[in-house]
Amino acid sequence: SVSLPCRSHPILAHLHTHIRSVRAWAQQGTAALAASVATGLAHVDALHAALGDLLDLPEAQDALSGAGGSVDRLLDSFLRLADAHGCFQEAVVALKQDVAEALAAVRRRDGARLASAVRAQRRAGQELARLAATARESAVRPSRLSILGGGHGSSAEVEVTGLLMESAAATASASAALFGAVAAMSVSVEAESCSCKGTAALVCLVKKNKKKSTASDLLNLDKDDDESEVELDS
């Protein structure tokens, strides 16, 4: 076996490959990202599996034990990512329910229910956009001098901690791209639901009902006026 630190070590080389794959996927355009979400998630999953292999090495554990405050920063970064993905899961579940509610409102020709579902869908999209912005802030690649407070520490500590920070930053970059792609799809679905034939028919029906109600009220008012005139004449 080859001891750490050494970029020729199989696990380290494997980790570098996955970091590059995740970053390459995250740098695609929105349309390409939306069409390859499963691929991006597979890259992130492979990266985290490689991270697990690295952390199983006694040499890596020894390097982290002397990293001091850098370990706390790493834990904080991954905890923020875990929290962001938890919020993302909740937002996606809510978005799915809102879309189903909007479709049900169109089928039942319920204008008020449709408007409420579209507003909720818009809020879910805004939450996804907020999560994307938050993840994007965490996606800054660390400089080598910032890894261990200006570069202090052994070469193994710098190498292992730097790779973990690179992995966290790459994951944050992919998360921002994923959240942004789903937010963009949410806006697209909302636009389509608001312009579909069923919704247009529903809007026309609501307008006709309003016109009928107004005309009916006017007729009733005229009828009441006529009856009042008859009573006064008598």
Image (cartoon, rainbow, N blue to C red):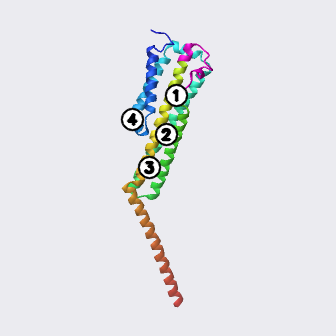
Give the image location of residue 126, x and y in percent. Answer: 51, 44
Q: Does residue 175 lie above or below 6 as drawn? A: below
CB under 8 Å between discs 3 and 4: no
- Residue placed at 48% from the left, 79% from the top? 222
Residue wearing tag 4:
36
* Residue occupying the far left of the picture: 197
Give the mark nearer the N terminus: 3 vs 2. 2
Q: Quick one: label 4, few (<14), some, or many (20+) residues within 10 Å?
A: some
At mark 4, the secondary structure is: loop
Q: Does residue 181 lie above or below 49 as drawn? A: below
Give the mark nearer the N terminus: 3 vs 4. 4
The residues tagged by marks 4 and 2 sit, at their Cα atoms, a distance apart of 21 Å
CB under 8 Å between discs 2 and 1: no
Residue wearing tag 2:
90
Closer to the observer: label 2 or label 1? 1
Give the mark nearer the N terminus: 4 vs 2. 4
Give the mark nearer the N terminus: 1 vs 4. 4
Give the image location of residue 159, x and y in percent. Answer: 53, 17
Mark identifier at residue 190: 3
User: Disc 4 marks which amino acid?
Assistant: Ser
Q: Quadrant of the N terminus?
A: top left
Mark identifier at residue 75: none
Instruction: Look at the image and say whether residue 147 sits in the magenta stretch.
Output: yes
The residues tagged by marks 2 and 1 sit, at their Cα atoms, a distance apart of 23 Å
The residues tagged by marks 3 and 2 sit, at their Cα atoms, a distance apart of 19 Å
Image quarter for residue 17? top left
Q: Which residues are magenta?
A: 140-159
Residue wearing tag 1:
169
